[in-house]
């Protein structure tokens, strides 16, 4: 997870109910395991879209989108709102793509569209996309 420190992800997993299998796996993993999961997911998305930008964007922002409620709850409980800058609040795929386009300057409109499609698919079907 590009924007979430793994130690913080582990704390979130311990303190909050995570809704999606892929994020449960990512948030509970140690640093090495998380890197392997991220790499497999990124490679799967790159193979599907033929775009490194889409793979990068999805991997950077998918956890923030899927587990926004858990992250927000964690930040409130820990009373650490400064961490919100590391983990921006995104509640829709549209917001997520906007952030991705700001972060990945070379992202094309077609890549943004592909990113939106993939993010929406993960939001709608939390089970199927976990096969990475």
Image (cartoon, rainbow, N blue to C red):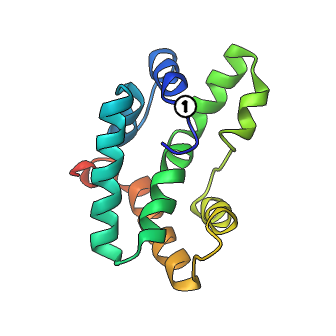
Q: Circle 1 — which element?
A: loop
> Which residue is depicted at the point 58% across and 84% down?
109
Residue 67: percent from left, percent from top: 52, 39
Q: Is residue 20 above or below residue 125?
A: above
| Front-lying residue, 32 or 19 | 32
Q: Is residue 8 above or below residue 102?
A: above
Left or right: residue 109 compared with residue 39 = right
Whether residue 45 is visible here, answered yes or no, is yes
> Which residue is depicted at the point 60% across and 31% down?
71
Left or right: residue 73 compared with residue 52 = right
> Which residue is depicted at the point 42% across and 35% down?
19
> In the rendered image, which quarter is residue 68 located in?
top right
Q: Is residue 74 above or below residue 113?
A: above
Residue 66: percent from left, percent from top: 50, 45
Residue where numbered disc 1 is placed:
5
Which residue is farthest right?
82
Which residue is farthest left?
131
Whether residue 25 is visible here, answered yes or no, is no
| Front-lying residue, 59 or 124 | 59
Mark 1: give few (<14), some (14-19) or many (20+) Cα within 10 Å. few
| Front-lying residue, 130 or 47 | 47
Left or right: residue 94 compared with residue 110 = right
Which residue is farthest front?
32
> Which residue is depicted at the point 56% across and 36% down?
4
Q: How many marks?
A: 1
């Amino acid at each position: 997870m590009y924007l979430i420190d793994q130690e913080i992800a582990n704390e979130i997993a311990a303190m909050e109910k995570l809704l999606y299998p892929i994020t449960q796996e990512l948030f509970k993993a140690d640093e090495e395991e998380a890197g392997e999961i991220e790499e497999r997911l990124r490679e799967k998305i790159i193979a599907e879209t033929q775009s490194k930008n889409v793979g990068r964007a999805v991997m950077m922002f998918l956890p923030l989108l899927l587990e926004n409620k858990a992250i927000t709850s964690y930040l409130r409980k820990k009373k650490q709102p400064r961490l919100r800058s590391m983990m921006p609040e995104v509640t829709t795929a549209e917001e997520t793509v906007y952030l991705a386009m700001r972060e990945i300057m070379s992202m094309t409109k077609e890549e943004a569209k592909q990113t939106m499609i993939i993010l929406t698919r993960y939001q709608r079907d939390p089970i199927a996309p976990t096969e990475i």
